[in-house]
Amino acid sequence: EDLISTLDSKTDAQIKSSLLSVQSLVGSFSNYFTFLDNGLGTITHNDVTYGTHSVSGNPVGGGVGYTDIYTTGDYIVTNEAELRAALSQAVSGEVIFIPGNVIIDIGDASAYSFTAFSVPEGITIASNRGYVYQDGSVSTGGMIRVTAVVSRCLFTVSKDNVRFTGLVLKGADPAQHLNHWDRCFAGESYDYSWQLDYYYFYCLYNTKGISITGDYCEIDNCEISGFCSTAISVGYNSTKSAPSQGHQFHNNYIHHNQIKALGYGIVFGEGYAVIAENMFNYNRHSIAGGGSINSGYEACYNVEFGQSLASYFDMHGGQDHNAGNAYAGGYVNIHHNSFLGTAMPYSLRGTPYLYQNFDYNILYMPYTSYSYRLYTAYEGIVPTNVYIGSNIWNITNGNVTPMDGYPH
């Protein structure tokens, strides 16, 4: 209110500073713009680039400037019935397009129900997020909005070569549910007899976005939020009796998927993906895995705005998956990311079956502020296949000099 009432007397720099303060207060973008404007979101040292930056030529997080924006398709849909009809008729190679000014509401909120969408092989569901119209206005992308809180996926993808691009997918539950967690687990001990525990915890519906078990799924230039359990999940391809593979999740803004205990931006059962040039915020784990040795991900050129209930990236292991071993996934390769908050960049929860790399990243805090969980697995074991390379720590105090390894 103060900014608006005194707008005429402020300079451009003062207005910019005030707006950044408002954004920081609201928390939608946390530390991102502060460091971006100070040249600390990406740092070049001795001709080596650290942190998030675009290698594709597209903006990190998508939006204005994205080069592959659809403006039409083989089917133009504006409501749920038309979308379901198009999915039942479309054949491989066809595009279902949702105009940028359209909001498609899914489900009956009062009845706590909706029917999931199953996407056929080779289909693209698209809108025009980031498209600049002739009058200069910008499309935020056609929205598919779930109004029913239900433990069900919005989209199931069991076929190959499916693409979601330029869309806004908005779930019904962006909350952390901290009070619900406390009712279940507060004062947790080895004697669970007096606690409500997981049975009660899962009485709360866990909303989900896109469930993928087919191969070669691409999700790009989308905004995905409000799915308290997980926005994107990757699982076993039962048709091929193998982990799903070849997925590309890039140039998206994925945020507010964050119920305590779950709350994943992208989560892996058995499958593999490259996760690049995304913006993340307000996810409990922006990327996580169940710990199967038949899973792995490369996370690169992403930015974490700073808000999270737990480590930003993750791979379960050891005691987490009760598989009788200490393995924490097949591989994890984390490089050229900017972690702009105080949470752990990742937590080592076991021994990777193949390897884990962490290099060319930018981190908010000094390395001394992070715990042994960066390099030590369960039961004090220091794996020999975990590599911490050259990273820049402590940008909150202006450091721009890389450090090799991790003293411990």
Image (tube, helix red, strand yellow):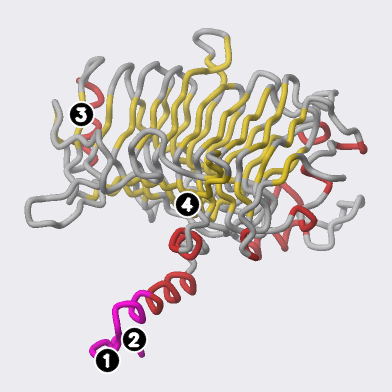
The label nearer to you, 4 versus 2, is 2
* Residue beneath the point at 19% across and 34% down: 70
Location of mark 2 (residue): 3
Which comes before the other along the chain, label 3 or label 2? 2
Q: CA distance from mark 1 to mark 4?
A: 36 Å
Q: Amino acid at mark 2?
A: Leu
**Which residues lie in the magenta part?**
2-16
Residue behind mark 1: 9
Examine the structure image and report whether residue 127 is included in the region drawn in magenta.
Answer: no
Q: Earlier in the sequence, mark 1 or mark 4?
A: 1
Q: Residue at x 50, y 33 (%)?
A: 275
Observer-nearest of 250 and 201: 250
Q: Residue at the location (20% across, 29% down)?
A: 85
Residue that mark 4 sits on: 255
Q: Is residue 298 above or below residue 370?
A: above
Q: Which residue is mark 3?
A: 85
Q: How many marks?
A: 4
Q: Residue at x 50, y 61 (%)?
A: 35
